[in-house]
Image (cartoon, helix red, strand yellow):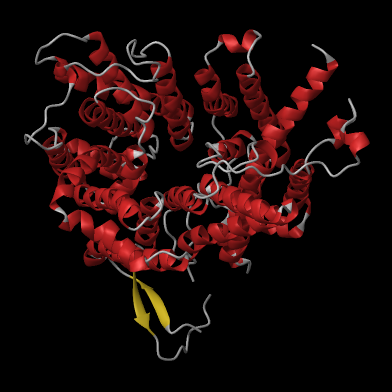
């Protein structure tokens, strides 16, 4: 019936493992261009503006860096978590609570100065994210409640927490009624790395986080434990690795990193807590983790691609009038196509001239 | 509490519960066939935006619901092809479908925000619809009766029909079902398509039944609550009713707290807004404490089927 047949590979193809994300991005461009052409936009221009202009326009590089940084930090945590087969999809909530905890420190130390304020905020952010991730960890390990649903439900609740705080207890008294906190004092704002740009210290930190993450996953016993429990739970049990401990570890690492990213974001680009603080980095980082093949170094490249679509999406809005949602569509297409392309990692496509034995289902 | 107020509350509860009930009924059938589709939220958003646009342009609610069902079904086929034909990871693909649905609906609905439409109202004679007491029976949107009908139909299908038995067999033991000559993949395609159509209708219920307009992400996590509801119901259709109306009640309390006055407004509005999500977690906790040990989930839930022939 078919001209082509799928044949299971004896070993997953390493070439395809790394080629699949590239293939997915290229195919997403082609399909995306077709979709946007079909609904009356200039499809080629849409792809050019979204994927190319942010790279050719050197003014946009700093935007790329600060958009990629939180994606890398959250994505590395999620890569570890998904490796352990633990499905934390509430990184957005942990990111938000991390930002809230950091804001708490910034407001409590308002008017003070000192080098210790930012590290304290970073600690508070990580603790906040961990605490929020501890809820699904506790419910999963103690009661067997699915962590997908609990972590996601907590994300919706965290957004309401931000709305409440900026409307009532933390509202800026001089803010003329705007629902936002006061602007952080100097000591609670993230310093910029290169004078005259918006690139803050979170950018190099993100790279360091990814390198540490790679090292831990590849070289340490903890990384080995996470990989074994995720890939072969039975073998892990015989090997004496605790499943419960791994779930806790996976959720605390991903929650802590998401919370830390929240701190960087609130003290860097925002410099105050606003209702618009939940910016979906936590959701996009899920795509970054998958596109980076659950490998911390891969997450760096994946986050850059996704940052390009963010920055390009904003550009395309002003230059060719593409709607705001366009970058989201491209991101979803990339993930769909990646999942489809993964078939090529496990199978090879063989063309069959005639099908003598083709009657199998 | 006056009789009038009590009836008004019941009407609101039933209305608020209906979209979740519709989506959960579809997802229940999908999961009984052994597939976990986490794209419900995305399919609902696609249904909501298409339902709204058809209603806005034609003014025909029946057509709006029908087109929303088709849109939901088509979007579920993306999931089906990836997970069933290409055996991609179901959790990741479901998430991707939700992300896609969010983006797609925002794109399709960008020129329609803050435009009003008519609600899909009861089709019974106005004397009954407007009657002080009888409106509790006759005053609902056709979507409400449809949701109840589907719960009963779903129960009958799963427990009394031959096709439903095959579907359950596929969900409990795919390899045995395959050996007996049933098409595991075929049955699962049909189940996923049904779930997609129901999610599409559930999405359309948001603009047609609750708030007569389009807003980005207007389903606000309802699709995820529907997924949780299936767990709460232990994969049994009639138990969905209890769960859905419980959520309807929580959401109604939120609405009444907004209206101001009374003991409900003592709690901050944001906490009320977070209540459906916190209630979902609470319900999941309670159900897992009661179940202690043996789960009633379909044995093959979430596992890809690769025929060993």
Residue plotted at (54% across, 31% down): B293
| Residue placed most toward the observer, B293 or B283 | B283
Residue B145 percent coordinates (x, y): 79, 43
Res A24 visible? no
In this rendering, position of residue B27 left or right of residue B3: left
Residue plotted at (58% across, 62% down): B189
Residue B297 percent coordinates (x, y): 58, 42
| Residue placed most toward the observer, B167 or A130 | A130
The N terminus of chain B sits in image quarter? top right
In this rendering, position of residue B132 left or right of residue B33: right
In this rendering, position of residue B255 left or right of residue B309: right
Q: Quadrant of residue B114?
A: top right
Question: Is B4 located above or below residue B46 in the figure?
Answer: above
Q: Quadrant of residue A321?
A: bottom left
Residue B140 percent coordinates (x, y): 80, 37
In this rendering, position of residue A88 left or right of residue A200: right
Res A93 visible? yes
Question: Is B200 located above or below residue A253 in the figure?
Answer: below
Q: How many marks?
A: 0
Question: Is A252 located above or below residue A12 in the figure?
Answer: above
Farthest residue in the left direction? A195
| Residue placed most toward the observer, A54 or A12 | A54
Residue plotted at (24% across, 53% down): A305
Residue B250 percent coordinates (x, y): 63, 24
């Amino acid at each position: 019936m078919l001209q082509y047949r799928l044949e299971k590979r004896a070993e997953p193809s390493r070439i395809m493992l790394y080629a699949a994300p590239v293939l997915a991005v290229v195919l997403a461009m082609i399909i995306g261009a077709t979709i946007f052409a079909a609904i009356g936009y200039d499809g080629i221009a849409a792809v050019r503006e979204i994927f190319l202009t942010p790279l050719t326009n050197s003014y946009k590089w700093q935007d790329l860096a600060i958009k990629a940084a939180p994606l890398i930090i959250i994505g590395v945590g999620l890569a570890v978590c998904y490796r352990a087969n633990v499905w934390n999809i509430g990184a957005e909530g942990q990111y938000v609570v991390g930002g809230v905890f950091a804001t708490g420190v910034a407001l409590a130390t308002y008017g003070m100065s000192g080098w210790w304020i930012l590290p304290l905020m970073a600690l508070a952010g990580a603790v906040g994210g961990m605490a929020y991730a501890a809820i699904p960890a506790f419910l999963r390990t103690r009661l067997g409640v699915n962590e997908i649903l609990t972590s996601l439900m907590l994300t919706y609740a965290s957004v309401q927490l931000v709305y409440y705080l900026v409307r009532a207890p933390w509202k800026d008294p001089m803010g003329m009624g705007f629902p936002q906190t006061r602007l952080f004092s100097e000591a609670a704002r993230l310093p910029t790395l290169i004078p005259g740009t918006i690139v803050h210290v979170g950018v190099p930190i993100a790279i360091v986080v990814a390198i540490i993450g790679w090292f831990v996953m590849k070289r340490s016993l903890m990384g080995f434990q996470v990989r074994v429990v995720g890939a072969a739970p039975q073998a892990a049990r015989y090997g004496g690795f605790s499943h419960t401990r791994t779930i806790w570890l996976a959720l605390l690492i991903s929650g802590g990193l998401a919370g830390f990213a929240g701190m960087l974001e609130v003290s860097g680009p925002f410099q105050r807590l606003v209702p618009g603080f939940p910016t979906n980095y936590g959701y996009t980082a899920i795509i970054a983790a998958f596109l980076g093949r659950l490998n911390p170094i891969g997450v760096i490249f994946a986050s850059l691609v996704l940052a390009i679509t963010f920055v390009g999406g904003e550009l395309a809005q002003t230059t060719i009038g593409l709607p705001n949602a366009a970058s989201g569509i491209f991101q979803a297409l990339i993930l769909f196509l990646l999942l489809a392309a993964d078939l090529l990692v496990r199978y090879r496509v063989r063309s069959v001239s005639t099908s003598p034995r083709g009657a199998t289902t | 509490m006056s009789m009038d107020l009590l009836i008004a509350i019941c009407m609101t509860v039933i209305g608020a519960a209906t979209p979740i009930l519709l989506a959960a009924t579809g997802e229940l059938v999908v999961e009984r066939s052994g597939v976990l589709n986490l794209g419900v939220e995305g399919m609902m958003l696609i249904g909501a935006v298409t339902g709204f646009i058809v209603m806005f342009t034609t003014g025909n609610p029946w057509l709006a619901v029908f087109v929303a069902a088709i849109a939901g079904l088509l979007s579920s086929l993306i999931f089906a092809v990836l997970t069933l034909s290409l055996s991609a990871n179901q959790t990741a693909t479901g998430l991707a479908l939700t992300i896609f649905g969010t983006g797609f609906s925002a794109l399709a609905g960008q020129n329609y925000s803050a435009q009003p439409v008519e609600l899909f109202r009861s089709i019974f004679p106005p004397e009954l619809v407007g009657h002080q007491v009888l409106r509790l029976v006759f005053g609902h949107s056709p979507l409400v009766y449809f949701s109840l009908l589907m719960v009963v139909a779903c129960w009958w299908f799963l427990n009394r029909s031959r096709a439903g038995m095959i579907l359950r067999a596929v969900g409990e033991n795919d390899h045995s079902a395959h050996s007996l000559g049933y098409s595991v993949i075929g049955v699962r395609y049909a189940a996923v398509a049904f779930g997609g159509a129901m999610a599409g209708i559930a999405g359309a219920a948001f603009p047609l039944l609750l708030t007569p307009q389009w807003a980005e992400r207007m389903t606000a996590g309802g699709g995820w609550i529907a997924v949780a509801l299936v767990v709460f119901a232990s994969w049994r259709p009639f138990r969905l009713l209890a769960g859905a109306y419980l959520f309807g009640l929580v959401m109604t309390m939120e609405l009444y707290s907004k209206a101001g006055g009374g003991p409900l407004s003592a709690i901050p509005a944001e906490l009320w807004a977070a209540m459906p999500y916190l209630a979902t977690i609470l319900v999941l906790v309670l159900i897992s404490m009661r179940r202690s040990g043996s789960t009633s989930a379909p044995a093959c839930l979430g596992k890809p089927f690769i025929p060993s022939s």
